[in-house]
Image (spheres, helix red, strand yellow):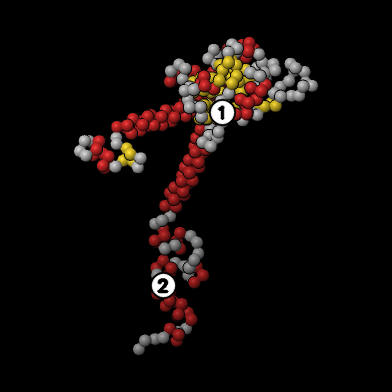
Amino acid sequence: GAVSLECLPLVMFEQVTQRLRPSWLQKGRGLGRRYSTGPGNLPPLKHKYLPLLPLGSLLIGSYVVMNKMQEIEEREKKRKEGPKTDKLQLGGPFSLVDFDGRPVTSADFSGKWCLVYFGFTNCPEICPRELEKMTAVTDAIDKDMGDGSLVPIFVTIDPQRDSCLGVKEFVTQYSPKIIGLVGTQEQVHAAAKKWRVYYNVPDSHTKKDDYIIDHSVVAYLMQPDGQLAGLYPQEFSNEDTIAGVKRRMKVFNKEAKKRIWKADFSTVLPWTAEGWTMDGWLRHLGVK
């Protein structure tokens, strides 16, 4: 009859159970070696996947790197586009004087793209650099979209020292296209307030010709309808500003064409107060 394993001596029990084990476990003598490390002690099925480990690591690493690069590209794209201006209400009606002494209002720039900058002629470094940038941007836009496509405007925040002649000499050394605007302290303050321009004029105890004005350094892109289209602080390079202005202008022009097309289309189709109706369409065709 069958022999019970319990009746076998311990040595014989070990020999019998050793033969009953799978071949891949017989190499490890004793139960303690079952989970020992080393290729020789792993099941054949696992050996097949060992070459795939480097490939898996490479794929995971590539995914992480691509994700990081995409994040960097998104941040760079947002940086070049500049701050969001959808909810900003900047600009508005103003009344100043140009460098030839003629009164100028915001209505004179209606229907035009304008790049507006607030500064002062005695600025030692920042304002000259910003006017150089303004000149480069204007020339690039005019070259790409035609002369007069962008109107550069310089508004002084120092009417106490900046005369019409002084502003004219200052801006024309950078470009004859730049329009310089001056005014009384009240007029300048009112215009700066509409654009939320920060500037700090020293008190009256400071010598008249010996002071520097701390002010915000931003170029404002205004649409033909007078709405703010973009903000370009001093950190923006010439290339970034040019690309940003072109992008804003193209988006606006594309949307304007859609609005014109929709307006023309609405005059052709039989729209009613409730919208398009079949009865209206039939009447339009002369059926009813």
Is 24 above or below relative to 107?
A: below
Residue 106: give x, y in percent of width and height: 54, 22
| Relative image position of residue 160 (x, y in whole percent) | 70, 17
Res. 174 visible in picture: no
Q: Residue at x 43, y 30 (%)?
A: 251
Q: Is residue 200 left or right of residue 75?
A: right
Taking the image as shown, residue 190 lies to the left or right of residue 35, namely: right
Please say whether residue 110 is visible from this viewpoint: yes
Q: Disc 1 or 2, which lies upstream in sequence? A: 2
Q: Is residue 37 above or below residue 74?
A: below
Circle 1 Cα neighbour tier, 10 Å, few/some/many (<14 / 14–19 / ≥20): many
- Where residue 32 appears, as percent x and y from the top left, is 51, 70
Residue topped by disc 2: 21
Residue 91, numbered circle: 1
Q: Nearer the viewer, residue 138 or 191?
A: 191
Residue type at tag 2: Arg
Frontmost of labels 1 and 2 is: 1
Quarter of the picture holding the N terminus: bottom left
Circle 2 SS class: loop
